[in-house]
């Protein structure tokens, strides 16, 4: 029996209110953090239920991919999926220690984020490489144009459009968003923006009767400039032009967590309410079977490229 291993990685998030402070310190690399920032972030988690659902949503994704991998496996081939988080338990390094102890010597890695940036996916890869200790590692850099991801997204958008009045359903403006990053990445020639733009163009062509806008969200509270425009600016613009409906589609994220449950469902929703607009968002792609099947295929292809299958 040939055993193959896939490490699924995600950002991580606090499982309970007591975790918020240590989690935030990890995200901020233990820089001095003011009580104001702690209080602000704690209040956000309080508003979304006192925890982040990212771990169980990522586990569901991994189990979905694992099932497809094993359903399509050749005779005598078996896949096992492992989980590592960047900023909370189970940390990537913790999981890799366990893998090492179990004698794993080859792994494919997949971050549950479709677009590459040296600050996001690159940081996951660094964490893996630092803990690899002789293990052979095959990284997957991006899946921003993976048909399974785009098709799952399309289905979720079509479902969300049903929440709007029938007469505007085919023309609701759509704001596609992703997590902002510091503008400094431009000078580094980072591919993040072009990865995102490719997804945006593809989705815009699938929903061509809808005005399509690109925006960022969730910029951090720092003095440095971050990528814009922020989605709140576009919501204001649509309203100023007489628009009463808007669909926000966070294509840079694949499951519900604080950037979706708070930044969109609380902040943008409040903004829209004040403006008298109807704002909706699709259910996140999460473990949509079409996406899981597509990612499983991508993982198999990557293992084949290494000559492991």
Image (tube, grey):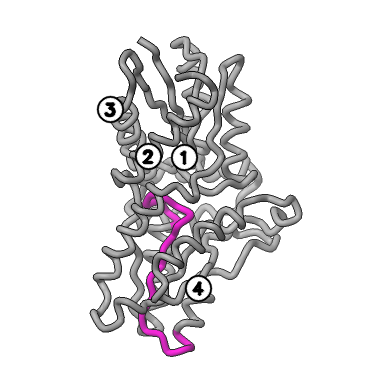
Label 2 residue SS: helix
Do tag 4 and tag 1 residues touch (Cβ < 8 Å)?
no
Residue holding disc 3:
71
**Magenta residues, start to end:** 239-259
- Judging depth in this view, the residue of 143 and 126 nearest the camera is 143
Do tag 4 and tag 3 residues touch (Cβ < 8 Å)?
no
> Quick one: label 1 or label 2, which is nearer the N terminus?
1
Identify the residue at horizontal 58%, vertical 58% (top origin).
180
Q: Pointer 3: residues within 10 angstroms few (<14), some, or many (20+)?
A: few
Residue holding disc 2:
58
Do tag 1 and tag 2 residues touch (Cβ < 8 Å)?
yes
Q: Is residue 309 above or below residue 286?
A: above
> Quick one: label 4 or label 2, which is nearer the N terminus?
2
Q: Pointer 1: residues within 10 angstroms few (<14), some, or many (20+)?
A: many
Q: State the CA–CA distance, disc 1 to disc 2.
A: 7 Å
Do tag 3 and tag 2 residues touch (Cβ < 8 Å)?
no
> Quick one: label 4 or label 3, which is nearer the N terminus?
3
- Residue 297 placement, left or right of 288: right
Label 1 residue SS: strand
Quadrant location of the C terminus in the rendered image: top left
Residue holding disc 1:
10
Task: State whether residue 36 appears in this view.
Answer: no
> Quick one: label 1 or label 3, which is nearer the N terminus?
1
Q: Is residue 291 above or below residue 94?
A: below
Task: State whether residue 107 appears in this view.
Answer: yes
> Quick one: label 4 or label 1, which is nearer the N terminus?
1
> Quick one: label 3 or label 2, which is nearer the N terminus?
2
**Residue 45, horizontal then vertical, whole percent:** 40, 53
**Residue 71, horizontal then vertical, whole percent:** 27, 27
């Amino acid at each position: 029996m040939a055993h193959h291993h896939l490490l699924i990685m995600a950002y991580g998030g606090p499982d309970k209110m007591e975790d918020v402070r240590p989690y935030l310190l990890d995200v901020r690399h233990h820089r001095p953090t003011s009580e104001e920032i702690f209080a602000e972030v704690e209040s956000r988690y309080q508003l979304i239920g006192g925890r982040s659902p990212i771990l169980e949503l990522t586990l569901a994704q991994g189990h979905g991919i694992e099932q497809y991998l094993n359903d399509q496996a050749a005779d005598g081939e078996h896949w096992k999926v492992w989980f590592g988080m960047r900023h909370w338990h189970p940390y990537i390094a913790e999981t890799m220690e366990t893998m090492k102890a179990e004698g794993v010597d080859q792994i494919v890695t997949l971050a549950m984020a479709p677009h590459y940036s040296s600050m996001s996916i690159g940081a996951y890869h660094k964490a893996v490489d630092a803990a690899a200790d002789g293990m052979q590692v095959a990284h997957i850099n991006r899946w921003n144009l993976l048909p399974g991801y785009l098709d799952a997204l399309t289905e979720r958008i079509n479902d969300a459009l049903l929440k709007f009045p029938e007469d505007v359903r085919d023309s609701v403006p759509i704001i596609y968003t992703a997590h902002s990053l510091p503008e400094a990445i431009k000078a580094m020639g980072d591919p993040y923006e072009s990865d995102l733009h490719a997804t945006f163009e593809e989705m815009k062509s699938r929903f061509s009767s809808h005005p399509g806008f690109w925006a960022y969200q969730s910029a951090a509270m720092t003095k440095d400039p971050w990528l814009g425009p922020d989605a709140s600016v576009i919501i204001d613009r649509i309203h100023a032009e007489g628009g009463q409906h808007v669909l926000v589609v966070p294509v840079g994220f694949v499951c519900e967590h604080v950037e979706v449950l708070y930044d969109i469902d609380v902040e943008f929703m409040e903004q829209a309410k004040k403006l008298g607009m109807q704002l909706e968002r699709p259910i996140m792609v999460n473990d949509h079977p079409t996406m899981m099947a597509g990612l499983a295929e991508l993982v198999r292809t990557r293992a084949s490229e290494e000559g492991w299958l």
